[in-house]
Amino acid sequence: MNTRNATLIWAGLLLLTLLSFSLGEVPNPGTWPLMVIGAATLIKGKLVMDYFMGLKAVGGVFLHVLTGWLVLVLGLIALAFTRA
Amino acid sequence: MSEQTSRQPPGDLAMWFFICAELLVFGAFFIAYAFARAKNIELFNSSQLTLNRTAGLINTAVLITGSYFVVRAVIAIRQNLSSLCARWLWAAFGSGVVFVAIKIVEFGEKLSAGISLSSNTFYMFYLSLTFFHFLHVILGMVILAAVALKAGKGGYCSTDYSGVETGASYWHMVDLVWIVLFPLVYVLH
């Protein structure tokens, strides 16, 4: 990780946060805004664990465990929200 | 290429087991929240409207920025710039101070409005989840301060900076948890 890449990822994380927040302001959102917010959260989480935590560079079991945690948690949240 | 074959996560291995345990607990909380909401949608939606979403947005930006500062600290120590590393770590500590201050205002607003854990199921989740995370931010700040003090005294160098990476990993975990918590509790409705 170099300074330029770190700064780009930081900017991307902020933009995805703003996107999620803006979609959350939509009254009575349908399914797709929820899916976009979920996808943005997945991307943000992966950016943090891959690049900020540095797990992508080393690979190994912790990268898979944390990615599995994120996918499982977001998947079950999506299931609960779409079935409600 | 050599990095990809190391398979060793940054920092102390014990911290990574601790991080996994923490994520397991938060994950169970998040899933319980989502399925409890599915049974009380009207209650959760109406209660969620009372939250200060702008404060949540600002706190998300603050934590992400704090994580960026920590990344810059790791980059600095890899270049053997110990003083610069310490300054970035103190900047990250400062982001923690801002987060804590905003959360205290938020908690104060809710408590002064007579809201407590027993008010309803949403507030039980909101207060317990955010306070639990709040405590992790406090612990993360203590770790950052300890690492920053040592870095300021030249305690790390480009060949020995595992302590910086260990503290950084914990702080990123705190950020990662908030990245899921913020949309779940403040945004999704």
Image (cartoon, coloured by chain):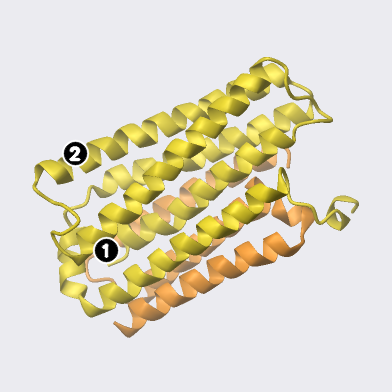
Question: Compared to A56, does B84 lie above or below?
Answer: above
Residue that badge 2 annotates: B108
Q: Position of residue B146 (x, y in %)?
A: 58, 26
For this orientation, the residue located farthest to the right is B2
Q: Position of residue B139 (x, y in %)?
A: 47, 38
Of the pair B154 and B90, the residue shown nearer to us: B154
Q: Quadrant of the C terminus of chain B?
A: bottom left
Q: Secondary structure at mark 1?
A: loop
Which residue is rendered at x = 74% and y = 24% of the image? Answer: B156
Which residue is rendered at x = 64% and y = 48% of the image? Answer: B15
Q: Picture quarter containing residue B86? A: top right
Q: Picture quarter containing residue A1? A: top right
Give, as a three-letter code, the residue at label 1.
Val
Rendered shade, chain A: orange
Rendered shade, chain B: yellow
Residue that badge 1 annotates: A26
